[in-house]
Amino acid sequence: MTAAASLAEGREYLRRHAWGDAFACLTAADAETPLQPEDLERLAECAQLLGRYAESDRFLTRLHQESLAAGDARGAARAAFKLGMSLITQGEAAQSGGWLARARRLLEDAGDQCVEQGYLLLPVARQHLLIREAGAAYAAFEAAATIGTRFGDRDLVAFARHGMGRAMLQQGDLAGGTSLLDEAMVAVLAGEVTPLLAGIIYCSVIEACHQIFDLGRAREWTAALTEWCASQPDLVSFRGNCRLHRAELLQLRGDWSDALEQATGAEALGGEAFYRMGEVHRLRGEFPKADQAYREAGERGRTPYPGLALLRLAQGQVDAAVAAIRAAVGESPGTRDRSVLLSASVEIHLAASDLDGARAASQQLSAIAGELAAPYLLALSAHAAAAVLLAEDQPGEAQSELHRAGVLWQQLEAPYEAARVRVLTAVASRAMGDEDRAGMELAAASRVFRRLGAGPDLARVEALSVRPAPIARGTLTAREVEVLRLVASGAGNRGIALELGISEKTVARHLSNIFTKLGLTSRGAATAWAYQSGLARIPAQNYP
């Protein structure tokens, strides 16, 4: 095949988004006769879509050098800009900064007004967003959009307007911000922007929806991204992001096996994929696998909290969980991360019998939920408030919060969280003497946990479902009751000894007496008995 024929066929494959075939034809044509700048730029983009980043960077470097040799300062600056942005995504900050600085210098020396000046505002705006300077970010994106409009560049306009939307979200203007995001997505769906930019906008908009807990939009745009990726079988870039977004949504919907599969398929993206794996393993009770996944997430730059703190709690390491969650909350200024951390903080502080700490975390979460008014946050907040009210022995007040949380979780199609609400509702009902309702709620929760494979939750519900003989409680001494309550909280013998000011040997003797009097053989059985008898409250770490 001649170079001209290969070039023509390559262009046709590009039009059809057949990236693998396009890459083969264009590189074949280039080997025969060096491609012209426009086709070389397309080849570089094609390589990026195929995940061949080193080759894309090589093509862009060549394009930059050839443009310089031809005296095309704008073309050289455009290639330098694209190379700089590519290197940012690869974590090469120093090289990226150098190429972007070169692009700016070339345009300053040329002195002409051009669309490339708008593109060079994008990394500036992005940096302002990263350090939460929303006003400056909005101004830079707006200036870029103005330049894009002047020169009729749809890519620049779409990306800049989407950036303006993200800046508005950061400023708290949810209606205005989501409106601009939707406008940018309309341009993507209409095919008005190039494929590479379309993928970038898809992922950024979905990320923004997750950050403001707009799960309806997140689901809609994730479905669109999935369809977009499926229409391009050769596509490598963005497919991993699509998997991560799907994994988070699938986990919420209770499709844990599918969520784990999607997260595993996105391992190359690093920490976030491993964190998502850790969450599924933890909920299933696969604690060693969860521990390893969280550690991998941390090593790859994704904070492993609150998942790792909740794992420590489930393992009975209450003090470690408290220390971890306190540090994580203190280091998290962002709304999304802080909200999830505060929810976990309520669980953990209640488990540690720190009612004041749990109440403070619940109040902070309530304030954030009230400001954003996102259903997911409102559900988390109501759930946490109910747990605190139960700890304060206010089951009636807790039930109204539980009703609100239950309705919201059902609307969000979140079966696991809805089942946890049912468990707390059972506890509240039992405290108010309504044993019939308590039994029905526990049975319903048990069915959901069994279907999901939520082993730890299922075990606790089954323990709550059986009422012990009331006479047994009266056989324990006051000190034995104290020891049993601490055992139920997850404390070990050393922790119990420190709490009560007695020796570990004395703790062991009390435990032996408890086992003998109650006819039990293990700490786990003693813990279950404590919950069943009402000596210990339902473990808050599992049902916030």
Image (cartoon, rainbow, N blue to C red):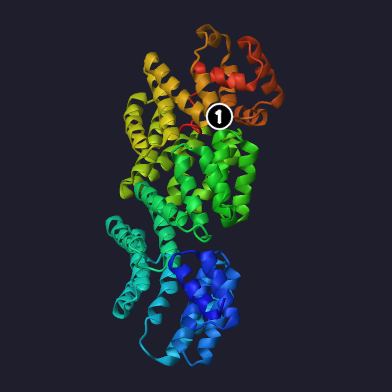
Look at label 1 and name its amino acid: Pro
Q: Residue at x 47, y 88 (%)?
A: 106
Of 421 and 343, nearer the camera is 421
Say which quadrant the C terminus sits in.
Answer: top left
Q: Secondary structure at mark 1?
A: helix
- Give the vertical position of 253 relative to 159 (above or below): above
| Residue 404 percent across, percent down from the top left | 32, 33
Say which quadrant the N terminus sits in.
Answer: bottom right
In the displayed image of the protein, which residue is found farthest to the right?
A: 505
| Residue 247 percent across, percent down from the top left | 49, 46
In the displayed image of the protein, which residue is found farthest to the top?
A: 471
| Residue 4 percent across, percent down from the top left | 51, 80
Q: Which residue is mark 1?
A: 456
- Give the vertical position of 168 relative to 494 (above or below): below
Q: Place residue 140 in its image quadrant.
A: bottom left
Of 366 and 460, nearer the camera is 460
Which class describes the residues within 10 Å of circle 1: few (<14), some (14-19), or many (20+)? some
Of 488 and 528, nearer the camera is 528
- Give the vertical position of 333 relative to 248 (above or below): below
| Residue 209 percent across, percent down from the top left | 38, 53
Q: Residue at x 69, y 26 (%)?
A: 503
Query: How many numbered badges does the structure rendering display?
Result: 1
Observer able to see residue 95: no
Horizontally, residue 33 falls left or right of residue 190, namely right
Q: Place residue 116 in its image quadrant.
A: bottom left
